[in-house]
Image: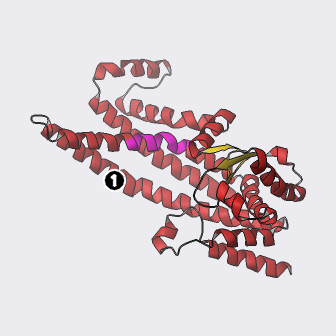
C-alpha cells in the first residue's frame, strides 16, 4: 500500500513538473512563430468543441506531447527502444548461461521460470544490475566477472523484487513522462546558446540578448521552483524502493547471497557527501547492508 502511494505521488509530481516545462516551451514557440501557422490547431480545437483560445492551445499542445510517450510506455517496441538507449543488448552465449544459472535460484523461490524474463547485458565501467519495464533484467559485464552464481542470484533477486513490486513499470512510465519534458528543456538551453552566439552580431544582438535572458530566467525559475523539488521527491521514493527490493530478496531466502553480492559491489564505493546522497537513486550501500544484516540475524 505504501509503495502504491509513493508511486502515485511520484507520477503526480512528474506530471506537474513536465507539464510546466512543456507549457513554457510551447509558449516560447508561440511567441517566436507567426500567428497564421497556428490556424490549423485552432481548427482542430474547434472540431473537438474546445474553445480555441491562446491558453487552450498552449495547454492542449503540452498535454498532447506529454501523453504520447505515456500511452506507449507499456508497449514492447517502446521498452526495447528505451533499453537500446540505455546501451543494453540481449544476453547471449556464456553470459546468458551465467545469468540464467543464477536466475534459476530465484525462480525456484518465486514460482517462475527463466523464460519469464528478458535478459540483457550492458557495457559499463562498474558492476551493476537493473530491472526495467515489465520483465527486463540488465546485468553489466563487470558484475558477471566479479561475483559467483550465488551472489549473482542474490542481486537478481533484488531486481526481480523491483519487477514484483511494480517499481519498474512506474520507472518506465516516469522515463517516458520525462522524455519530451527533458527534450523541451534541452531545446530551450540550445536556443539560449544560439542567442549568446548571435549577441556578437550587430543589429540583432540586442534582441538576441533579451530573448536569451528571458529564457534563462524562465528556465531557472521552472528548474528551482518545480523541476528540482520534483526530482528530489522522486529520488527519495527511488531510495525507498531499493530497500523494498532488498526486503523481497531476503523474504524469498536469498538474504545472505544478496549481502555477499552487495558487499563485493561496494568495495570500490567512495564515501559520498550528504548532497550527493540526496541526489542519488540508491541509498548508501553500507546502509543497505546493515538492514540486510539485521534481517539475517533475525532469521537466525
Q: Quadrant of residue 269?
A: bottom right
Q: Circle 1 is placed at which residue position?
A: 221
Q: Secondary structure at mark 1?
A: helix
Image spot of residue 226 (x, y percent) = 42, 54
The image position of residue 72, as x and y in percent, is: 62, 34
**Up/down of 236 relative to 214, above or below:** below
Q: Residue at x 55, y 35 (%)?
A: 67
Left or right: 107 as drawn, with respect to 124: right
Q: Is residue 37 above or below residue 24?
A: above
Residue 181 location in percent, x, y?
Answer: 46, 43
Residue, x 70% and y 46% (percent of image)? Answer: 120
Q: Is residue 227 above or below residue 61?
A: below
Q: Quick one: quadrant of the N terminus?
A: bottom right
Viewer-side residue, 36 vs 130: 130
Q: Which region of the structure is painted magenta?
A: 176-186
Q: Can you see residue 118? A: yes
Residue 244 spot, x, y in % from top left: 71, 64
Amino acid at each position: 500500500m505504501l509503495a502504491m502511494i509513493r508511486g502515485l505521488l511520484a507520477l503526480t509530481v512528474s506530471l506537474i513538473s513536465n507539464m510546466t516545462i512543456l507549457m513554457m516551451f510551447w509558449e516560447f514557440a508561440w511567441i517566436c512563430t507567426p500567428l497564421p501557422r497556428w490556424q490549423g490547431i485552432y481548427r482542430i480545437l474547434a472540431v473537438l468543441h474546445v474553445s480555441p483560445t491562446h491558453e487552450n492551445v498552449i495547454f492542449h499542445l503540452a498535454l498532447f506531447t506529454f501523453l504520447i510517450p505515456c500511452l506507449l510506455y507499456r508497449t514492447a517496441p517502446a521498452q526495447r527502444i528505451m533499453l537500446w538507449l540505455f546501451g543494453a543488448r540481449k544476453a547471449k552465449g556464456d553470459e546468458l548461461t551465467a545469468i540464467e544459472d543464477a536466475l534459476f535460484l530465484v525462480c525456484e523461490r518465486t514460482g517462475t521460470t527463466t523464460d519469464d524474463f528478458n535478459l540483457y547485458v550492458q557495457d559499463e565501467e562498474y558492476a551493476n544490475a537493473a530491472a526495467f519495464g515489465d520483465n527486463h533484467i540488465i546485468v553489466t559485464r563487470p558484475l558477471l566477472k566479479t561475483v559467483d552464481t550465488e551472489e549473482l542470484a542474490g542481486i537478481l533477486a533484488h531486481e526481480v523484487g523491483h519487477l514484483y513490486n511494480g517499481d519498474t513499470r512506474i520507472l518506465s512510465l516516469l522515463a517516458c513522462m520525462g522524455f519530451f519534458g527533458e527534450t523541451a528543456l534541452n531545446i530551450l538551453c540550445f536556443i539560449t546558446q544560439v542567442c549568446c552566439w548571435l549577441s556578437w552580431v550587430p543589429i540583432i544582438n540586442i534582441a538576441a540578448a533579451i530573448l536569451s535572458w528571458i529564457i534563462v530566467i524562465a528556465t531557472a525559475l521552472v528548474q528551482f521552483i518545480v523541476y528540482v523539488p520534483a526530482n528530489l521527491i522522486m529520488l527519495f521514493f527511488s531510495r525507498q524502493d531499493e530497500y523494498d527490493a532488498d526486503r523481497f530478496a531476503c523474504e524469498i531466502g536469498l538474504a545472505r547471497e544478496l549481502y555477499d553480492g552487495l558487499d563485493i559491489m561496494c568495495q570500490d564505493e567512495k564515501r559520498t557527501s550528504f548532497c550527493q546522497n540526496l541526489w542519488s537513486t540508491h541509498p548508501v550501500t553500507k546502509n543497505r547492508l546493515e538492514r540486510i544484516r539485521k534481517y539475517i540475524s533475525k532469521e537466525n
